[in-house]
Image (tube, rainbow, N blue to C red):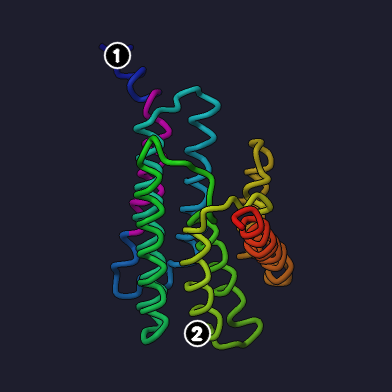
Amino acid sequence: MEKMQKNFLYRNLANVTSILGVLPLVLLFLDDGYRYVIPLIIFNNVMDDLDGVLAGKLNIRSRFGADLDNVCDAVAHVALALAVGAHFGGMILIASAIAAGSVIIRATSRLNPEAVSGGGSPTNELMRHLLFILLLEQPLGFEPGSLLIPLFLLHTISMLVPYKMPALIRGWSKSVIAIGTVNVTLIAAWLIPSATLFIAGAFVVTYMYSFIVEGARWLRRSE
């Protein structure tokens, strides 16, 4: 019995990690829950990458695990986007709700085993860009709404485009070391303000390059 229990826990270690990446989001429902948005975005990103690494390294990939990961991503990213939208209110809340709809559509489409995967930007990319805007708000002294609305609307489109966006930094990161470096970089952007703008610039430039250049190539192929 003990051996069976250990085997069950072993086979579901990645699934447990996926769920643990979502549970702390309950902090958003506290009266001062918004104060936790930045660490929650980083924590969720780390756990989302960790479950994939565990599944691959321990050879415990499964269709259920992939579906659970997509569902957990959808729940977490919808909650985080709406939390930011609700904090600022008005048009930002509406834009965040529209983006949340795209997150749900993208996650649902990936639950179909026959669906062609690999198109559009990951929902995690929206979370990373959201993180950078929130981190740069005070150092640069700008009004977040001026960037949050176009950010939500742009990602609403990019998450659902039919073409691949291979130049994303996270997309380049295949090894455990590279994936770990991406997450360390996000933590550095949070803890080292002098580095935030440069880190944000790298992620945003590669995103815009993928979105525009690959979109133009897709349009040419479709003609």
Q: Name the residue under label 1.
A: 2
Mark 1: few/some/many CA within 10 Å (<14, 14-19, 20+): few
Question: Which secondary structure, mark 1?
Answer: helix
The quadrant where residue 147 appears = bottom right
Q: Residue visible at 36% across and 56% down?
A: 105
**Residue 18: image x %, image y %?**
40, 42
Residue type, numbered disc 2: Gly
Mark 2: few/some/many CA within 10 Å (<14, 14-19, 20+): some
CA separation in Å, label 2 and label 1: 54 Å
Residue 88, relative to residue 68: is it above or below? Answer: below
The one of 128 and 190 positioned closer to us in this rendering: 128
Rendered-image quadrant of the N terminus:
top left
Q: Residue visible at 34% across and 49% down?
A: 108
Q: Residue visible at 43% across and 67% down?
A: 36
Does residue 117 belong to the magenta stretch?
Answer: no
Q: Give the range drawn in magenta.
A: 11-25
Q: Mark 2 points at which residue?
A: 145
| Main secondary-structure element of the magenta-colored stretch | helix
